[in-house]
Image (cartoon, rainbow, N blue to C red):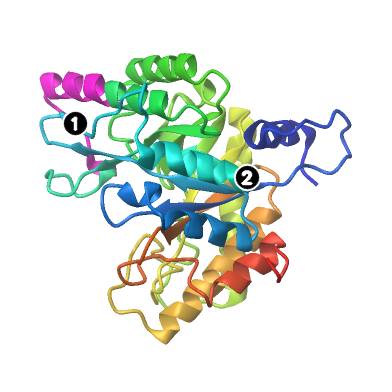
Amino acid sequence: MRSLTFVLWICLLLGTPASATPGEEAPEAVRGVTISCQTWGREWGSAEMPGALDRTKKVGGNWVAIHPYARISKDGSLRYRNLDPLRPPGWIARPIAWAHERGLRILIKPHLAYWGSGFSWRGEIRFEDPTARARFHREYAAWILALAKVSRGADSYCVGTELEGTTSADAEWRSLIKAVRTTLPKVPLTYAANWDRYQDVGFWDALDVIGIQAYFPLVDHENVPTDAELSAGWKRILTGLRAYAKKSDRPIVFTELGYDSNPLAASKPWKGSRRPSEAGRELQRRCLRAALEAVEAEPSVVGLFLWKDFAGSARGEDFNVLRPELRPVIRKIWGASQDR
């Protein structure tokens, strides 16, 4: 049973009436799937997107997420496609409408495309040069606000993903969050911090939910772990998160949680595998089951977004958690009926 405080936050996320009676059953938690793409995102507006949304429904999901891109350069400048609020692009407007037609809610979760920029990943994005740093915050804010304006109708909005190299600029981030609130006044806001850096974010009080990219190592060795070790790993992780959520007076949502079909999925869940093996697929299944069971039972975590499914044909397996053999695991824990 979730506490009344967290029931209210779940209601905020789900848009359902909050129970005023402590002891009443909480609303459904956030059970989401991120629908990814193989290009810049045109797939989200394509005829293949409804099928991906239907897959989420069939495993018991009630949310989806998409992750629009802007490209970052070493000098702090950004490039992105035209975002006209008077004519929202189809790859944003259509998935919002299609999700709602199916009773799904949708999170818009912007990502910076860093490949070719000189940064090895988003967590490395930082600027020592004051001019580059100022340019980044100015152009990043312009993009996030432009994207927010064409995302009206979305059910939640993420102001950034894995950018802890920039979050020490507290005033700039708070100014951005305030501007997004003006644009999307009734939409719950979050930020997606990397699993090992969420405590470095100083502006959680300006947001509604603590977002975490939940690639937590479950074991400290590279041998095949037992189910007991996987459960113990989540118990340890959630004990720390529970304390942090209480201290911050905010619930937590896992903005990403996933495993590739990799023999190192338990010790290094962020790593992909170019050569999937049967052992890797089995460990992926077990890690996924352990994670879903742990989150369902944890009151401080209001839910999660699985990473990931694809609109269209996926290139390889690449963290694809809705492959046919994994769907029964998700369906069982999320309570979807077999005939969906």
Residue at 71% x, 70% y: name it. 339
Question: Closer to the camera, 180 or 118?
Answer: 180
Q: Secondary structure at mark 1?
A: strand
Residue at 53% x, 77% y: name it. 325
Q: CA distance from mark 2 to mark 1?
A: 33 Å
Please say if 287 is above or below 104: below
Residue 52 inside the magenta-drawn segment = no
Residue on which disc 1 sits: 78
Residue at 33% x, 35% y: name it. 164
Please say if 149 is above or below 258: above
Crowd class of label 2 (few under 14; some 14 to 19; many from 20; radius 10 Å): many
Q: Main secondary structure of the magenta part?
A: helix
Residue on which disc 2 sits: 301
Write down the region rendered in magenta: 123-140
Question: Closer to the camera, 170 or 338?
Answer: 338
Residue type marked 2: Val
